[in-house]
Image (cartoon, rainbow, N blue to C red):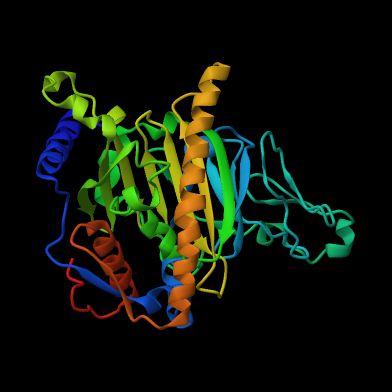
Amino acid sequence: MRRDRQLELMRRLMKYLDEGSTAKKERMFRNPMSAYADPERHKRERQVFFRDRPVLLGLTGRIPNPGDYVTDAVDGVPLILVRDRQGVARCFVNVCRHRGARLVEGEGCGLKMFSCPYHAWSYTLEGRLKGIPDARSFDEVDKAEHGLIDIPVRESHGLIWAGPINRDAPVSDRDPLGPLEGEIEEWGFESYVFYDTIRIVRPMNWKFVMDTFMEGYHISALHKNTIDPIIHTNLSTFDAYDDHHRMVIARKTFDELRGRPEEQVDLIPYAGFIYSLFPQAMLIIQGAANVELWRVSPTGDNPGECQIEMTSYIPEAPKSEKADNFWRKNFDLAIKTVEAEDFTLGATIQENAAARLQKEVIYGKNEPSLTHYHSGIRRHLGLDSLPGMED
């Protein structure tokens, strides 16, 4: 991140710290509880946010070399993300055109060709149908028309986006990052390497997962034994970039920057940078400059279930056991904190939402990211504004 940007953020955080304040909106925000539990709204969200627009699948380091691949699912659609022989990232529906079997599971490297485990129909890494055993029995199949179903891919600034899945939706030439593009470029994510990943399914609405990372107001209460000793509670900046936004939170070591000459200031080790990449991903850059990518997707018709993936990327591959232990500790702490504390609580909130006894939830003035995010959700769904919804 550019130094002038770091200095401006540091000054803001220091001012908030001295005032006992944080970034704020002018008004509170009241969000209907049905936003998390209504089946009809959920159906509309699946179409608008996961079928009709690109979604972030990973960083370049997830598939760094030709033949590297990883399977995924977005809104229940099975996908393969692969780097072809020319080094181009591609995405295909993970379905054989013969009988509909999945071609591959999990992830791997050094792949030369896709071969269906059912009848061994084979496809190139570019998605072309290559081979059909007993081809004489399929003489009416035009290979050119029966390649894998491809999904548009855009790889820029170290991020890989795929979509829209909906074949009838327009494909935009605009970078999905919009006005955030220049700042993301400053981080140099192209050089980051994959460390580890975990994928889980949890009984909560997909937006609850995003909400988890959009305020630091809860840190001292919910995370008192995990990250509260590390991070200041209820202290952050907030900046909107169209639908996306950025928060910067201060670590407890942040006060060490006080009085330091600005030419010596490096904010990154003393802060956490949280980028909400609308609508389904969070990039979290920690003090050691490792990157956590949290992604979420509905699993189907049930608004109370979603798939969550956290993938860790680091500046360089560990060169020693000590380095590996350091990154492992960071990874395990992130999972322990969010899975055992945030998501466990989120599942109970989902039960409360499904009970339909409470009409709304309230986001305070000190939770501007939530107001911005859910205003954007409503705007893209074409829903009317509600009192306290002004962005």
Could you say where residue 187 lies in the image, as x and y percent from the top left? Answer: 33, 33
Quadrant of the image occupied by residue 2: top left
Instruction: Report the quarter where the C terminus lies.
Output: bottom left
Q: Is residue 108 left or right of residue 17?
A: right
Could you say where residue 169 lies in the image, as x and y percent from the top left? Answer: 44, 68
Q: Is residue 287 left or right of residue 298?
A: left
Q: Where 242 sits versus 363, above or below?
A: above
Q: Where 112 sits versus 55, above or below?
A: above
- Depth check, front residue: 117 or 373: 373
- Depth check, front residue: 205 or 146: 205
Is residue 158 visible in this depiction of the protein? yes
Is residue 56 visible in this depiction of the protein? no
The residue at the point 87 percent across, 53 percent down is: 133
The residue at the point 28 percent across, 53 percent down is: 217
Could you say where residue 204 lies in the image, as x and y percent from the top left? Answer: 50, 66
Residue lying at the far top of the rendered structure:
320
The residue at the point 34 percent across, 52 percent down is: 221
Could you say where residue 107 lies in the image, as x and y percent from the top left? Answer: 66, 43
